[in-house]
Image (cartoon, grey):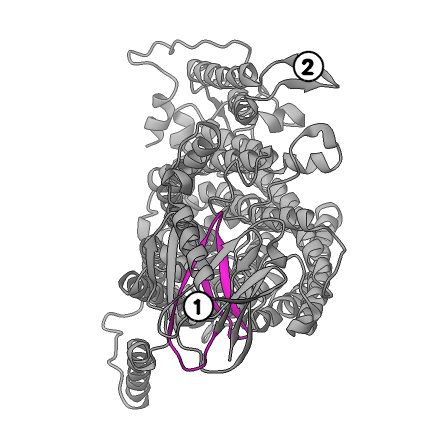
């Protein structure tokens, strides 16, 4: 295998060096701005995903606090209706596409290559492309906020159509400004990023596993990442088509959703939810993976029923494509469709429940260590179960008629997405922080932040169940004092402030730890998977020797079979040295440049009818040339990308695993 | 036994005693819950059957205008109040951001209430009962309903429909 690595990538058939063309020399800087912008290292890309995601998580949180402040008392005038509409639209869009999904992508990047015993993902430059395309999409979604500060910007504010942008509200007639176009193209761009990243992770997980790491020895997190990646590449085309249709309706006079032209707004609901419901599982399956890694470590025993946990994750992925119309029970689909989707929705609770039983089975009889990540993971099980219960209540179609578009639904999906996904992500950040920064988060402050978040979260969202059952509609800017919603809203807002304090504490502690935290070794939790067998933070090449995997809990096995492991590692190191050393991918400018071209093209495209005005001077009569230039730049970048060749260089280690390669020495 | 070892073959034991009783009870309870839904659907006769037809907004508006002209009994704040014939059709039209007309129904009589929208999607949320139905343009959503209690019921829009969403409130009066 080492032979294949050494020979395949950078020599043409016959042994002659492959012909390449480099417009400018490939970057080699490992640090500094250039090092980060051109990085193909999965750990650096993961950190950037994580950093941006946390930034947007905090922005989305601030948006939520403004929404809750507006609803604290009836008939409040804290913010206007227009700003309120923009805030809840962007709160939903941000939290889903710019916070939870990229945080999951961050962990995919950071962990998958190490957990499968590889040195990077399968396509390192494509991975950088995913990141920068994601950044381009994030900028397009949020650029509308600038028009609140610079009115001449001409956007009419941020998108204000709700995160599921029901047609025909998205038509040119009802939202003529650019914000809706930016929402459409921003989501399209984010979708591209996710599809590219998913293909990369699928290939990485299937093709780049270390010797002995069979599929049924794969850590559950990797399994959930694999299922999630398949869900992404199957679900995103549905929304991509729907978004193209909206764009055509808006700019080229088609009638997909225009009722006057014979279009069907209900088509949007179907296309949106056939993406949107798998999306829910895209958000929650990776968190199920983190929890399945954290619970065994702190219960001091292997995961209970590993194959069943894996199969039920895959079953959730399959059934997840057959439940979308439960979002549409009250549109008048008829009894047969309603009954079928109700039953499918109830069926999906079975594999989910199986997982919960297996987590409890893991805890059962274990030697439970309540460190902070474990607290969040235990909180996840309980809170996610609560969200699951209200989910089953929705699945009963007659009951759903009392809950549709009410605050009950808001309570339900926040229990699933905060109590579920976010709790698991906070657990994961806390758990893997020592691995990637080499410092342990202080236990007291970590637990304190957990309890504040736990109490704040429940105070915010538990009253919303009752508000919803008492008829409070979602997305309402304000309400009358005689509706009986005053106390619940006041309590929810107070809870939201407490939740804000908790989240602030959590991240303040992380920042403190980053600079001043207690240093830790490779394996502070006595953990089970391969990432804990390498130094903290991991070196660029991850493993000095490719590991051989003998058991599901690969590192627990290594710890109890030290001689065997040392012998195998020495053999692997020798074999790799004989074939030229550790082969690492070269950095590249082109992923960043291609993403930039895509952003310029997409940003200018919906403005093609408007003249380009800069500081009051009309420079161009249309944005079309700029849009075409952007697309041209994208094509050119991809062309040069393919010409520069895969590149690559070797790292040589001495017997202790120290890097002896002279800096900048390629080959 | 070390937890790292593979458990011996034949670890499965068939449930017996209390365990078997509990599994049996749980299974029966699942069946009861599952069967309750269809049972209550037919026995209770309270659920919407999800009846809907294609219409054009202009065609629906013409039907509503005709209906209002035939059954109008008054006006409140510029919105017509109508009293449809028992057993017959009644119409509620949603548009940005109002519900029209105000229905005056009689307790114990059955009506077929047609819901549709002129412009974009709205949500028909009947308060304080808290029954919710989506109202789409181009789609005639029919509710067959029999009021069982008297009073004034509020219609709240619960599907986001733009800047005036929170002010879109209508009324049904039952006497």
Q: Quick check: do tags 2 and 1 share a chain?
A: yes
Toward the viewer: A580 or A253? Answer: A253
Please name the residue shown 59% across and 58% down the image. B168
Viewed as shown, does residue A337 lie left or right of A158? left
In the rendered image of this protein, does residue A655 appear above or below residue A469?
above
Viewed as shown, does residue A635 lie left or right of A427? left
- Which quadrant, please, contains the N terminus of chain B? bottom left
In terms of sequence position, does the residue under pointer 2 or pointer 1 come before the other?
1
**What mark, if any, has residue A401 been given in the picture?**
1
Toward the viewer: B152 or A433? Answer: B152
Tell whether position B111 is magenta.
yes
Measured Cα–Cα span from mark 2 to mark 1: 53 Å
Q: Name the residue under label 2.
A: A618
Give the image location of residue A555, x and y in percent.
Answer: 45, 53
Q: Can residue B134 be seen in this view?
A: yes
In the rendered image of this protein, does residue A395 appear above or below residue A256?
below
Please name the residue shown 42% across and 10% down the image. A20
**Host chain of mark 2:** A
Q: Can residue A657 be seen in this view?
A: no
Give the image location of residue B156, x and y in percent.
Answer: 56, 64
Which quadrant would residue A599 be assigned to in this image?
top right
Q: What element carries label 1?
A: loop
Tell whether position A357 is magenta.
no
Give the image location of residue A148, x and y in percent.
Answer: 73, 38
Please name the residue shown 45% across and 75% down the image. A364
Per the rendered image, the range of residues in magenta is: B105-133
Q: How crowded is mark 2: few (under 14 residues within 10 Å), some or many (20 or more)?
A: few
**Host chain of mark 1:** A
Q: Residues within 10 Å of mark 1 (few under 14, many from 20)?
A: many
Q: Is mark 2 on a helix, strand or loop?
A: strand
Viewed as shown, does residue A224 lie left or right of A175? left
């Amino acid at each position: 295998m080492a032979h294949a690595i050494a020979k395949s990538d950078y020599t043409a058939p016959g042994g002659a060096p492959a012909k390449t063309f480099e417009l400018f020399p490939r970057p080699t800087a490992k640090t500094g701005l250039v090092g980060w912008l051109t990085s193909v290292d999965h750990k650096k890309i993961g950190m950037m995903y994580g950093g941006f995601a946390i930034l947007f998580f905090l922005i989305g949180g601030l948006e939520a606090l403004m929404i809750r402040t507006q609803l604290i008392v009836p008939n409040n005038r804290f913010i206007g209706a227009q700003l309120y509409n923009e805030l809840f639209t962007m709160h939903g869009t941000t939290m889903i596409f710019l916070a939870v999904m990229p945080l999951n992508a961050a962990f995919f990047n950071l962990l998958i290559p190490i957990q499968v015993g590889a040195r990077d993902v399968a396509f390192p430059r494509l991975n950088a492309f995913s990141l920068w395309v994601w950044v381009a999409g994030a900028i397009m979604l949020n650029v509308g906020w600038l028009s609140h500060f610079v009115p001449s910007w001409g956007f009419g504010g941020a998108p204000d159509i709700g995160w599921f942008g029901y047609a025909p509200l998205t038509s040119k007639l009802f939202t003529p400004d650019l914000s809706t176009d930016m929402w459409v193209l921003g989501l399209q761009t984010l979708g591209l990023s996710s599809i590219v990243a998913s293909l990369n992770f699928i290939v990485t997980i299937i093709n780049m596993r270390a010797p002995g790491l069979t599929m049924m020895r794969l850590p559950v997190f990797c399994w959930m990442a694999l299922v999630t990646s398949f869900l992404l590449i199957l679900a995103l085309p549905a929304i991509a088509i729907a978004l193209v249709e909206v764009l055509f309706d808006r700019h080229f006079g088609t009638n997909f959703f225009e009722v006057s032209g014979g279009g069907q707004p209900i088509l949007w609901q179907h296309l949106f939810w056939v993406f949107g419901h798998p999306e829910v599982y895209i958000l929650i399956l990776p968190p199920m993976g983190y929890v399945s890694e954290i619970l065994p470590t702190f219960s001091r025993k292997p995961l209970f029923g590993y194959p069943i946990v894996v199969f039920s994750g895959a079953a959730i992925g399959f059934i997840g494509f057959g439940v979308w119309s439960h979002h549409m029970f009250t549109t008048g689909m008829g009894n047969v469709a309603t009954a079928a989707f109700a039953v499918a929705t109830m069926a999906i609770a079975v594999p989910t429940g199986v997982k919960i039983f297996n987590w409890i089975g893991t805890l059962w009889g274990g030697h439970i260590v309540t460190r902070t990540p474990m607290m969040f993971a235990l909180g996840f099980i309980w809170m996610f179960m609560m969200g699951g219960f209200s989910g089953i209540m929705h699945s009963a179609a007659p009951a759903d008629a009392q809950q549709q578009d009410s605050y009950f639904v808001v309570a339900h999906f926040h229990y699933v997405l905060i109590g579920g996904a976010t709790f698991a992500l906070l657990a994961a950040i806390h758990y893997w922080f020592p691995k990637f920064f080499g410092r342990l988060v202080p236990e007291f402050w970590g637990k304190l932040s957990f309890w504040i978040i736990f109490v704040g979260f429940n105070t915010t969202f538990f009253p919303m169940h009752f508000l919803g059952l008492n008829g409070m509609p979602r997305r309402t800017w304000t309400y009358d004092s005689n509706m009986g919603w005053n106390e619940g809203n006041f309590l929810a807002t107070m809870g939201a402030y407490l939740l804000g304090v908790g989240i602030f504490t959590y991240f303040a502690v992380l920042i403190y730890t980053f600079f001043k935290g207690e240093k830790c070794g490779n394996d502070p939790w006595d953990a089970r998977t391969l990432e804990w067998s390498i130094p903290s933070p991991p070196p660029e090449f991850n493993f000095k020797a490719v590991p051989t995997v003998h058991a599901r809990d690969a590192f627990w096995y290594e710890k109890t079979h030290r001689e065997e492991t040392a012998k195998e590692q020495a053999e692997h190191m020798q074999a790799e040295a004989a074939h030229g050393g550790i082969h690492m991918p070269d950095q590249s400018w082109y992923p960043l440049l291609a993403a930039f071209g895509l952003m310029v093209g997409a940003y200018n495209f919906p403005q093609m009818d408007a003249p380009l005005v800069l500081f009051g001077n009309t420079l161009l009569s249309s944005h079309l040339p700029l849009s075409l230039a952007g697309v041209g730049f994208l094509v050119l970048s991809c062309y040069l990308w393919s010409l520069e060749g895969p590149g690559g260089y070797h790292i040589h280690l001495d017997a202790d695993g120290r890097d002896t390669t002279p800096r900048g020495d390629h080959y | 036994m070390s937890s790292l070892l593979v458990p011996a073959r034949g670890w499965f034991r068939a449930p017996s005693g209390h365990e078997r009783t509990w599994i049996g009870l749980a299974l029966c309870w699942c069946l009861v819950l599952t069967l309750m839904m269809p049972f209550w659907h037919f026995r209770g006769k309270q659920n919407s059957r999800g009846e809907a037809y294609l219409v054009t907004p202009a065609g629906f508006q013409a039907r509503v205008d005709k209906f209002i002209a035939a059954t109008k009994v008054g006006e409140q704040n510029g919105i017509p109040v109508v009293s449809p014939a028992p057993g017959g059709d009644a119409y509620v039209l949603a548009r940005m951001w109002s519900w029209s007309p105000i229905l005056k129904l009689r307790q114990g009589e059955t009506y077929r209430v047609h819901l549709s929208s002129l412009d974009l999607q709205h949500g028909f949320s009947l308060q304080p009962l808290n029954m919710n139905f989506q109202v789409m343009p181009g789609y005639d959503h029919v509710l067959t309903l029999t009021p069982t209690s008297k009073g004034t019921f509020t219609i709240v829009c619960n599907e986001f429909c733009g800047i005036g969403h929170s002010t879109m409130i209508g009324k049904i009066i039952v006497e």
